[in-house]
């Protein structure tokens, strides 16, 4: 079992994210994962630095810990050729510690360039499929062109390629995306403990790592932890169909206005009890995920890192699928 630390790029500035990554390495985490957003989910989160610059700085400040995007949409805000180049460069600078997490994206981030964002999920998945094909092609070396239904590439070459290409982990919220992950990716990325995502991924040929984000909020008491998560992370309870569609933080504030503290306590591990964190993580392990990302929405990241090192590292690593 691999355990990762989620760098909450919507809640902290770039220098603080680098500092947290250094602390996560010292605490024994296997990897850090950062969201690649243009906007935060809510205005009161207050941040959204450029993920690729942050990752480059982390690569320079750390020695062992893995790095991952969780996840990048390589279709509208970026052209996949740019992501192919960025990922290759980061793989070299990190000495092959980088995993490229890719997904179909959210309107929150992709609408900002004014090119439109496909209304239908099928269109987004076709875009993602073409993007992965372009990235794979460029990583083969030499000059490459591509003429897809949505995306094109004209006589392009990535000159600096690592000796070991990054793992591509494709995000999935449903069966179609899980099949793309199995067919074109090297790994799977998800935010919900749905067993069918893993089985669909494997059925499509997937054999690689399976990443999942586990919701939690650490504080010395349960109420403080839950209130912090309610304040900054209630958007996570709106569901993926809402999360992928709304264009701005103000819309997420309105859509999540009815979320209550009890709703947070039901979904998140909150407070100081290690067993609650194990209980929330167990369904992800039962579903077949083997890379667990600790997504802490609590008010004290240093307190959580200390809590993880003292109380969580060993029991989380011991988790195994339980009989149905």
Image (tube, rainbow, N blue to C red):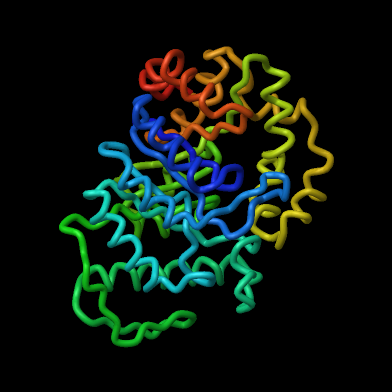
> In the picture shown, does residue 28 fall above or below 184?
above
Please, is residue 300 above or below residue 141 in the view?
Answer: above
Q: Quadrant of the N terminus?
A: top left
Q: Which one is nearer the viewer's eye here, 302 or 106?
A: 302
Q: Residue at x 58, y 53 (%)?
A: 48
Residue 85, image x and y in percent?
32, 68
In the rendered view, would you say 88 is above or below 115?
A: above
In the image, is 241 to the left or to the right of 148?
Answer: right
Whether residue 97 is visible to the viewer of this picture, yes or no, is yes
Foreground of the two, 307 or 242: 307
Residue at 31 percent of width and 37 percent of height? 65
Q: Is residue 177 visible?
A: no
How many marks overall? 0
- 87 above or below 218? below
In this picture, residue 235 sits left or right of residue 125: right
- The one of 307 and 179 positioned closer to us in this rendering: 307
Residue 191: x percent and y percent? 54, 42
Residue drawn at (30%, 47%) of the image: 60
Q: Residue furthest front?
A: 15
x, y (%) of residue 122? 56, 68
Q: Is residue 235 left or right of residue 214?
A: right
Most distant residue in the left direction: 163
> Looking at the rendering, which quadrant does residue 290 occupy?
top left
Q: Residue at x 36, y 22 (%)?
A: 317
* Quarter of the figure with residue 248: bottom right
Q: Position of residue 128 (x, y in %)?
A: 46, 67
């Amino acid at each position: 079992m691999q355990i990762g630390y989620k760098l909450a790029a919507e809640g902290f500035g770039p220098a603080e994210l680098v500092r947290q990554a250094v602390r996560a390495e010292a605490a024994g985490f296997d990897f850090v994962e950062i969201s690649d957003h243009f906007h935060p989910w809510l205005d009161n989160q207050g941040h959204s630095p450029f993920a690729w610059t942050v990752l480059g700085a982390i690569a320079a400040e750390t020695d062992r810990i893995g790095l991952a995007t969780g996840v990048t949409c390589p279709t509208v805000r970026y052209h996949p050729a740019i992501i192919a180049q960025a990922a290759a460069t980061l793989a070299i600078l990190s000495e092959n510690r980088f995993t490229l997490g890719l997904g179909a994206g959210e309107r929150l981030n992709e609408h900002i360039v004014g090119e439109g964002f496909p209304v239908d999920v099928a269109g987004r998945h076709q875009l993602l499929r073409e993007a992965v094909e372009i990235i794979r092609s460029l990583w083969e070396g030499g000059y490459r062109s591509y003429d897809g239904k949505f995306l094109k590439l004209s006589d392009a070459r990535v000159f600096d390629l690592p000796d070991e290409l990054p793992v591509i982990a494709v995000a999935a919220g449903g069966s179609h995306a899980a099949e793309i992950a199995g067919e074109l990716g090297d790994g799977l990325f998800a935010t919900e403990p749905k067993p069918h995502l893993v089985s669909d991924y494997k059925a499509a040929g997937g054999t690689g790592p399976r990443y999942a984000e586990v919701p939690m909020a650490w504080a010395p008491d349960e109420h403080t932890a839950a209130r912090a998560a309610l304040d900054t992370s209630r958007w996570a309870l709106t569901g993926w169909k809402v999360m992928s569609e709304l264009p701005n933080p103000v819309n997420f504030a309105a859509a999540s206005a009815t979320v209550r503290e009890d709703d947070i306590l039901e979904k998140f591990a909150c407070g100081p009890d290690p067993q609650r964190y194990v209980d929330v993580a167990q369904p992800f392990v039962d579903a077949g995920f083997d890379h667990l990302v600790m997504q802490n929405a609590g008010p004290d990241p240093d307190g959580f890192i200390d809590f993880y090192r003292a109380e969580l590292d060993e029991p989380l690593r011991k988790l195994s699928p339980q009989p149905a």
